[in-house]
Amino acid sequence: MQDLLINIMSKYGYIGVFFLILVENIFPPIPSEVILLVAGFMTHSSRLSVPLLILTSSFSSLFGAFLLYYLGRILTKDRIEKIVKSKIGRILHLKLNDINKSIDWFNKKGSISVFFGRCIPIIRSLISIPAGISKMNITTFTIYTFCGSLIWNTILISLGKIFQSNWIVITKYLKIYKEYVIIILIIGLVIYIFKKNLKKD
């Protein structure tokens, strides 16, 4: 993958970076950490600069977040109710009342969730959907999304520049970080389903 990223950035510059980060935001399995580390590394062998890379990637992150935010907004109460009543909803023991409570919670604590969520792999993209569902104020969403993305992008691009060709070493630690996040999410889901089954019994 790294050869493809280097080729795209070498050929298309900031436009290539914007496109890659946009795709990563919409399709979470593509790792932003690799894209950003490579971008930082590329500053040594191209005309790409750290400040412009940070701005380009942050605005691209924001644009991608907007797409998922508005995807969340089109999930009306009727559509959410259909999901709850669907096979997936039954498997996960989803209840409309629980979802409404989650939306209420997101209305109160959503801003900080969006901010910190932008620095957590996988969640960083998906956090925009519940923000849209809860109809979070677009200005608030924009500010917290951009600031969170700015911090994440600045750290990774800077690390890519500092470690240069050794950036691959960092990906190993980031992979461990991501694995812990996935484990925590799975444990959280298991606990949620377990509690639902206890209440049901």
Image (spheres, rainbow, N blue to C red):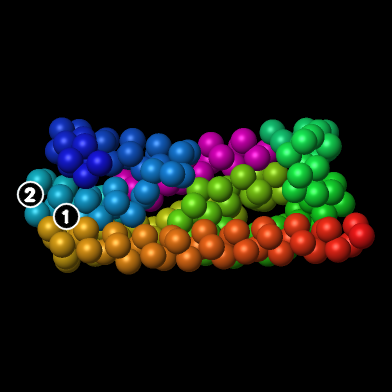
Instruction: Verify CB contact (< 8 Å) between mark 1 and mark 2.
Output: yes
Q: Residue at point 51% right, 44% down?
A: 65
Q: Amino acid at mark 2?
A: Ser
| Residue 32 x %, y % | 36, 50
Q: Amino acid at mark 1?
A: Phe
Mark 2 lies on a secondary structure that is loop
Q: Residue at point 90% right, 57% down?
A: 200
Instruction: Determine if the magenta segment contains residue 68.
Output: yes
Farthest front residue in view: 201
Farthest right residue in view: 201
| Residue 159 x %, y % | 24, 64
Q: Residue 70: name its quadrant.
A: top right
Farthest left residue in view: 45
Q: Which mark is residue 41?
A: 1
The N terminus: image quadrant = top left
Q: Is residue 12 above or below residue 126?
A: above
Q: Residue at point 58% right, 52% down?
A: 127
Read off the magenta span.
56-73
Q: Residue 133: name its quadrant.
A: top right
